[in-house]
Structure formats: structure tokens, C-alpha cells
Image (spheres, rainbow, N blue to C red):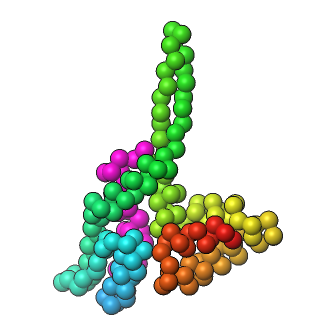
């Protein structure tokens, strides 16, 4: 399982990727992007400000957010048990896989992996809806629900599709 340092780096990279386009926007638009990102993470993770060189971005992943994701990782820990037999003694090694999919799911970051994961379990797939159409409709649904529901509630609604 990723340690808290790795989780903080993953979250920081995620926020960085989500807000990269803010450098090419007017300050007010970049601040709106920051506000949406902060709402998505339910924490103040990014801000934009004007500087002598243009727009600067400040990313701050606080320990509360890291703890929240760490706790989710503990609950959703994936164990691979490798059993080897050396001198008739069984040695069990537990390995964990960094679960960026889980982080992306919780933040509703529609990476191709997340869309494919949700699509594979969707009843819409069995009804003949193709992946591209599913992706477009999923994006629209999330946009419409974000103002009224938490990411967790939205994810539950998506899983019912």
C-alpha cells in the first residue's frame, strides 16, 4: 500500500494535472478552476494568484486530505499473497498495489481507466451503448450532479447505471 508520502505525491500530481490549464487562462477563470478543484477534493488544495511573471499556482495537500485517502486505501487494500516454499517453510509475502484507480474514482477524475472500469460494470454496456457514448454521457451526468451531490453520492448513482 502506498505510504502517506506517496499518496501526497499522487494527490499533488492529480491536482497539478487538473489545474495545468489555469496558466493559460485569465486570473478569474483560473480562480474558478481552483474553486471547482477544491470543491472536488473537499479541501483547499490549489489557488491561483497574479504575480510579476503572470499567474502563479499554489498546490497545498494538507495532512487531513492525505489521511482521508490513506484510510480509504487501508479499507480497500489489495493483497497479493505469494507463497514460496523454502526448506519446507512457508513464507507469505503480502504486497500491495498502489491504487490510483481508487483515488481517481473517489475524485471522479474520468481517466480512461476510470471510464473503462465503470463501463465494464455498467448495465448500459450490455444494452449496447458504446464506450465513447458512455464517456460523453458520464461526463454530462457528473457535471449536472456536482452542484447537488458529493462525489461519493455521484459514484453510487453511476454504479447503478
Where is residue 13 shown, x and y percent of the image? 38, 62
Q: Quadrant of residue 34?
A: bottom left
Frontmost residue, 104 versus 123: 123
Is-magenta flag for residue 136? no
Total numbered labels placed on residues in the image = 0
- Judge whether residue 20 can be spotted in this image: no
The residue drawn where x is 40% and y is 80% is 36
Is-magenta flag for residue 12? yes
> What quarter of the picture does the C terminus occupy?
bottom right
Residue 145, placed above or below residue 16: below
The residue drawn where x is 37% and y is 86% is 32
Q: Is residue 37 left or right of residue 158?
A: left
- Judge whether residue 133 can be spotted in this image: yes
The residue drawn where x is 50% and y is 50% is 76
Q: Is residue 144 left or right of residue 21?
A: right
Where is residue 88 shown, x and y percent of the image? 54, 10
Q: Is residue 142 left or right of residue 107?
A: right
Q: What residue range appears in magenta?
A: 1-25
> What quarter of the picture does the N terminus occupy?
top left
Q: Please, what is the dominant secondary structure of the magenta stretch?
A: helix
Where is residue 9 shown, x and y percent of the image? 34, 56
Residue 105, placed above or below residue 98: below
The residue drawn where x is 54% and y is 20% is 84
Q: Quadrant of residue 118?
A: bottom right
Amino acid at each position: 500500500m502506498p505510504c502517506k508520502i506517496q499518496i501526497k505525491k499522487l494527490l499533488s500530481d492529480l491536482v497539478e494535472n487538473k489545474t495545468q490549464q489555469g496558466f493559460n487562462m485569465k486570473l478569474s477563470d483560473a480562480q474558478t478552476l481552483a474553486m471547482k478543484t477544491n470543491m472536488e477534493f473537499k479541501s483547499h488544495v490549489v489557488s491561483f494568484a497574479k504575480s510579476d511573471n503572470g499567474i502563479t499556482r499554489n498546490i497545498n495537500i494538507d495532512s487531513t486530505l492525505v489521511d482521508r485517502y490513506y484510510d480509504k486505501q487501508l479499507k480497500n487494500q489489495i493483497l497479493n499473497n505469494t507463497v514460496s516454499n523454502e526448506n519446507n517453510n512457508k513464507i507469505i509475502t503480502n504486497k500491495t498495489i498502489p491504487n490510483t484507480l481508487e483515488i481517481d474514482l473517489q475524485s471522479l477524475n474520468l481517466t480512461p481507466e476510470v471510464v473503462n472500469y465503470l463501463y465494464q460494470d455498467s448495465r448500459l454496456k450490455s444494452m449496447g451503448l458504446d464506450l465513447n457514448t458512455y464517456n460523453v454521457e458520464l461526463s454530462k451526468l457528473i457535471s449536472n450532479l456536482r452542484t447537488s451531490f458529493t462525489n461519493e453520492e455521484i459514484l453510487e448513482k453511476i454504479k447503478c447505471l
